[in-house]
Amino acid sequence: MVCFFAMSLMGGEVCAGGWPLAPGSGEIITSITWLSADERYNADGNKRSTSRYTKLEIAPYAEYGLLENLTLIGEAAYTSEETDYFGYEFSNAGLSRLKAGARIALGTWKETLYSLQPLITLHLMENGNDPAATRSGDVDTEFGIVMARSDMFYGMNIFSVQEVAYRYRDRQRPDEARADVTLGIKPWPDIMFLLKSLNTVALKSTANDELYQSSKLGFSTVHTLPRHFAPGWSAETGIEQTIIGRSTIEETVLRFAIWYSF
């Protein structure tokens, strides 16, 4: 799940991962997520009961403004997962991935900022909820276009960030297409609401002849902490839920994140 969660508050204004950071400024978002699933979508999109799967993930994500139109991106993740397969328990834990890339602002057209966003991900462990059966040493290379727009609505800052990306996956894993949308609104100076749509589809079948897809909805609240004792710090709480899927698990994800802007 990449720059979609890279939102920032700078100078009291709403900004999002679709905009470049000023040179020398940056942001670190450390998220803690708890995923649980006990149902799975079959190839026809119907749900059925399956073994219980849980995953705890701690993922620090960073952005840094290197040049006026160039923002560097980096992420690491520690994952602990457990599968209860009808009484038999399997667990796995460790550093699961490293990610690096950049967002390159191209220019504005019709009040929308367009950027290119190349990313590369190195996987360091198997992931029990990945239908593509990713293994340690696998590499994903992603090429994305980001479209960002902000406006005012009845005195409130609002914005949208849309990402469309193609993800190449090595070792004969299916390539993927990704289309994500974030809608944000800031009704009060220290509160921001985010509504998210996350969509991924495989572009060819897996080794098990499955063509998987997943659509999730998410909602979260970001609260800027009091500046007199925690300048630059914010906290996010939220939830995500799979609403449509094929050949993938139905996920419920609880999220807590701490943001620091500098």
Image (spheres, rainbow, N blue to C red):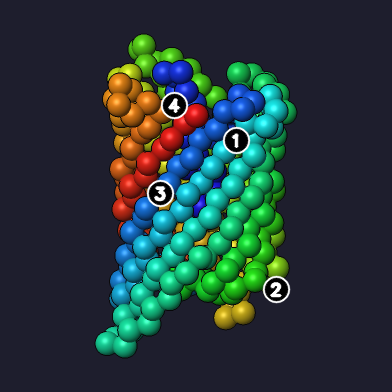
Whichever of callouts 4 and 2 sits on the residue coming sooner in the sequence is 4
| Mark-to-mark CA distance, 1 and 3 | 17 Å
| Mark-to-mark CA distance, 4 and 2 | 39 Å
| Mark-to-mark CA distance, 2 and 3 | 29 Å
Relative to 119, 199 lies left or right:
left
Q: Which residue has dot 1 on it?
A: 64
Q: Secondary structure at mark 1?
A: strand
Which of the two marks, 1 or 2, is nearer to us in this view? 1
Whichever of callouts 3 and 4 sits on the residue coming sooner in the sequence is 4
Q: Residue at x 31, y 80 (%)?
A: 84
> Which amino acid lies under the numbered mark 4 shown in the image of this protein?
Leu
Front position in the image: 88 or 168: 88
> Which amino acid lies under the numbered mark 2 shown in the image of this protein?
Arg
Rate crowding at label 3 as few (under 14), some (14 to 19) or many (20 or more) other CA atoms within 10 Å.
many
Q: Residue at x 41, y 56 (%)?
A: 58
Q: Residue at x 37, y 82 (%)?
A: 90
Rate crowding at label 1 as few (under 14), some (14 to 19) or many (20 or more) other CA atoms within 10 Å.
many
List x then y, in percent, for residue 150. Answer: 51, 21
Q: Which residue has dot 2 on it?
A: 171
Q: Which mark is residue 9?
A: 4
Whichever of callouts 1 and 2 sits on the residue coming sooner in the sequence is 1
Which of the two marks, 4 or 2, is nearer to us in this view? 4
| Mark-to-mark CA distance, 1 and 2 | 32 Å
Which of the two marks, 1 or 4, is nearer to us in this view? 1
Can residue 187 be seen from the camera position used here?
A: no
Whichever of callouts 1 and 4 sits on the residue coming sooner in the sequence is 4
List x then y, in percent, for residue 52. Answer: 31, 75
> Which amino acid lies under the numbered mark 1 shown in the image of this protein?
Tyr
Q: Which residue has dot 3 on it?
A: 31
